[in-house]
Structures are given as structure tokens and as C-alpha cells.
Image: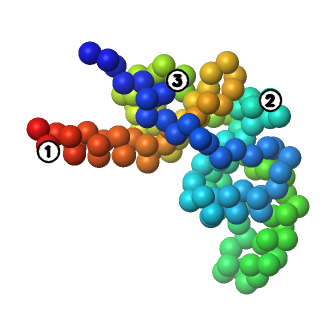
């Protein structure tokens, strides 16, 4: 029986940004593409970090402080991703068994695993990918 690997369920067409881009671009990308995790790569496509929706929330000036949305946008245009991104990220090999990947997510309480091959980002596997996979299995089981 074929063991399911991360490469079998990962998202391959990943939206990436570069470390020298600014937070306003990250916010726009997350909002437009409905993603919560954005891998950061260098010009050769090598994975260098990750920025998440949670990271952005933690550095957003609170609306309770009376800060206008335009002020936040202006701040974001001047803060490079490199200042905020996480650099020590747990990654996955495309050949990693899916059950091991799930165990890594649960044990480390992370929402995604960037998938790396030869130092290059080739995909990402997220909680949503695991849910979609589980759903497809449950649907198949119902049909049997």
C-alpha cells in the first residue's frame, strides 16, 4: 500500500514574498488571496522565513489606541518583512509521511509546514490541507 506523503497533499502554487518587501504587501496578499501563511524566499527561491496572519496581528497597533487605519497602512509601508518574519521555522521534506507531518503540527502548535527540497520552497502544507484531505477520505468512506 502506498504511504501518503506530504508532496501528495501540499499546496504547490504558493504565494511567496521577499524579505525586503513591506508589511502592506503582506496584508494585501493575505486579504486578496485569503491565505494566513506567506513563505519568504530569496531571489533564488530558497526559503528564508515565514510571516503569518498571527504575526501581523501581534504587531498591529490596536484600534483601541485610536489609531486610524491610514496611519497603520503608512506604518506598514515602511516596515520590511525581514523585521517581522519568523526565521526559525519547522519545515517538511516532500517525502515525509503525512501522519508524521500532522504529529509535527500538533506537537509544535504550528499552522503550516513549508515544504523544502534542495533548500528551495516547493510547497506548503497547512491545517486546511489536512482538513481537506480528511474530508475527502470521509466522503469516500461514505460512498463505500
Q: Does 133 sit left or right of 92 as displayed?
A: left
Label 2 near label 1: C-beta < 8 Å?
no
Q: Position of residue 124 (x, y in %)?
A: 55, 37
Label 1: element kind: helix
Furthest residue in direction left, as rendered: 144
Q: How many marks?
A: 3
Q: With respect to residue 63, does 119 lie above or below?
A: above
Q: Position of residue 110 (x, y in %)?
A: 51, 42
Tell me the residue at 43%/34% (across/down): 9
Dot 2 or dot 3, earlier in sequence = 2
- Front residue of 64 and 24: 24
Dot 1 or dot 2, earlier in sequence = 2
Furthest residue in direction right, as rendered: 78
Label 3: element kind: loop
Tell me the residue at 79%/78% (across/down): 70
Q: With respect to residue 125, does 131 lie above or below?
A: below
Quarter holding residue 127: top left
Q: Is residue 110 shown to the viewer in this render?
A: no
Q: Alpha-carbon distance for marks 1 and 3?
A: 29 Å
Quarter holding residue 97: top left
Q: With respect to residue 12, does 71 lie above or below?
A: below
Q: Does 103 sit left or right of 29 as displayed?
A: left
Furthest residue in direction front, as rendered: 143
* Residue identified by numbered label 2: 44
Tell me the residue at 54%/27% (across/down): 92
- Front residue of 51 and 144: 144
Q: Alpha-carbon distance for marks 1 and 2?
A: 45 Å
Q: Position of residue 106 (x, y in %)?
A: 42, 38
* Between marks 1 and 3 in the image, the one whose residue lies nearer the viewer: 1
* Residue identified by numbered label 1: 142
Q: Alpha-carbon distance for marks 2 and 3?
A: 19 Å
Amino acid at each position: 500500500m502506498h504511504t501518503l506523503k506530504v508532496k501528495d497533499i501540499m499546496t504547490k502554487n504558493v504565494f511567496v514574498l521577499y524579505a525586503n518587501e513591506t508589511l502592506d504587501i503582506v496584508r494585501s496578499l493575505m486579504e486578496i488571496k485569503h491565505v494566513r501563511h506567506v513563505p519568504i524566499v530569496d531571489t533564488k527561491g530558497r526559503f528564508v522565513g515565514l510571516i503569518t496572519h498571527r504575526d501581523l496581528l501581534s504587531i498591529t497597533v490596536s484600534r483601541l489606541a485610536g489609531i486610524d487605519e491610514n496611519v497603520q497602512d503608512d506604518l506598514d509601508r515602511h516596515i520590511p518583512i525581514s523585521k517581522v518574519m519568523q526565521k526559525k521555522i519547522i519545515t517538511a521534506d516532500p517525502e515525509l509521511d503525512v501522519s508524521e507531518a500532522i504529529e509535527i503540527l500538533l506537537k509544535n502548535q504550528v499552522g503550516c509546514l513549508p515544504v523544502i527540497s534542495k533548500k528551495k520552497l516547493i510547497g506548503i502544507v497547512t491545517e486546511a490541507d489536512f482538513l481537506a484531505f480528511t474530508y475527502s477520505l470521509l466522503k469516500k468512506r461514505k460512498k463505500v
